[in-house]
């Protein structure tokens, strides 16, 4: 929908600038002003695009003040809402602004584009025909525990953002409470350092530590739903060559213990699978 004035919700790249659409660039160029999270961050994008615009910062704590400030302009000027990266309103400020426009018959339209949620699901290797987006992994201990319990009780895939500072605690909790479900951790999606780590809790922990990924970068976690559990035997098949090598050097008991620690799959299942190999 084309509107002469009102609010345009515009998605911006989550990393790779090549992901921004021509329509998004054209909309930003034609805007009278831009409402954004962090003007310093948004200025970097605008400078790369060769665009100069007035920037107004919006956060959860000042959203009402911003709405009051721009309310008259919204009825006669073209305003663009962007977030620091990706699609606005997805765990970012702007919801009250949208509500205000809808309630006051101010035109609102969306220019869709990049979001970290969809590629993280696509790359996870976990069923995504149904999924729940849970926002950000909480900061408080109680919040974390309640959050993981919610995932544990979910029958469908769960996807959420987790900060680098909480990644270690997040993976530890998931490993403790949901050892038998697959996890995917996406790092720096669309950027040069993009990495995807897949497996059960112990394997994920080891990979993150070995690659020095704890406490740096931006992460999206995807957790398999309770009704979607992929057969452990299928997962173990991925380690067939490594297990055969281990069996030539260690006892069956030792190999079972090693595979159990690496994958999180129960010792009983690992034992039966190794016996089937022999």
Image: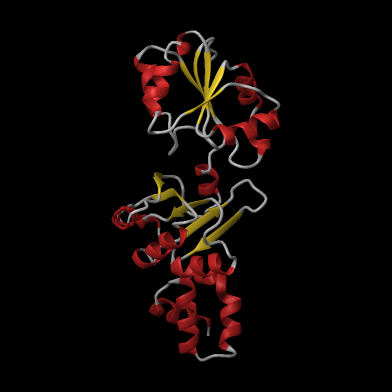
Q: Does 70 appear above or below 131?
A: above
Give residue 31's position: percent from left, percent from top.
58, 17
Asked where in the image residue 269 lies, by quadrant, the reply is bottom left
Q: In this view, does 135 lie to the left or right of 205?
A: left
Give residue 108's position: percent from left, percent from top.
46, 18
For the point 34% across and 64% down, which residue is it? 177
Q: Looking at the image, what colour scheme do you see?
A: secondary structure
Q: Does 196 appear above or below 175?
A: above
In the image, 275 versus 104, the foreground residue is 104
Q: Is residue 275 visible?
A: no
Give residue 274's position: percent from left, percent from top.
49, 81
Q: How many labels does the image show?
A: 0
Give residue 173's position: percent from left, percent from top.
37, 63
Asked where in the image residue 49 lies, by quadrant, the reply is top right
Q: Can residue 161 be seen in this view?
A: yes
Q: In this view, does 76 lie to the left or right of 14?
A: left
In the image, 125 versus 160, the foreground residue is 160
Q: In this view, does 22 lie to the left or right of 83?
A: right
Q: Does 51 appear above or below 155?
A: above
For the point 57% across and 76% down, which residue is it? 240
Q: In this view, does 255 lie to the left or right of 229?
A: right
In the image, 278 versus 2, the foreground residue is 2
For the point 64% across and 36% down, which residue is it? 19
């Amino acid at each position: 929908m084309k509107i002469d004035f009102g609010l345009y919700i515009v998605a911006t790249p989550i990393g790779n600038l090549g992901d921004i659409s021509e329509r998004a660039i054209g909309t930003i160029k034609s805007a009278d002003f831009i409402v954004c999270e962090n003007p310093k961050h948004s200025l970097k994008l605008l400078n790369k695009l060769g665009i100069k615009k007035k920037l107004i910062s919006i956060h959860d704590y000042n959203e009402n003040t911003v709405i009051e400030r721009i309310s008259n302009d919204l009825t006669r000027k073209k305003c663009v809402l962007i977030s620091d990266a990706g699609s606005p309103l997805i765990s970012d400020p702007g919801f009250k602004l949208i509500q205000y426009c809808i309630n006051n018959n101010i035109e609102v339209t969306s220019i869709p584009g990049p979001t970290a949620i969809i590629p993280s699901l696509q790359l996870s290797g976990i069923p995504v025909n149904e999924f729940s987006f849970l926002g950000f992994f909480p900061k408080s201990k109680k919040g974390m525990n309640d959050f993981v319990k919610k995932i544990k009780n979910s029958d469908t895939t769960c996807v959420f953002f987790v900060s680098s500072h909480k990644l270690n605690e997040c993976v530890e909790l998931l490993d403790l409470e949901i050892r038998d479900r697959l996890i995917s951790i996406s790092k720096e999606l669309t950027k040069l350092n993009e990495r995807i780590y897949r497996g059960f809790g112990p394997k994920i922990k080891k990979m993150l530590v070995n690659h020095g990924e704890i406490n740096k970068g931006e992460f999206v976690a995807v957790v398999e739903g309770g009704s979607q559990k992929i057969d452990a035997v299928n997962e173990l098949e991925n380690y067939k060559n490594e297990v055969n090598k281990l069996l030539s050097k260690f006892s069956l008991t030792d190999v079972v213990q090693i595979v159990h620690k690496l994958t999180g799959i129960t010792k009983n299942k690992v034992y039966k699978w190794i016996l089937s190999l022999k």
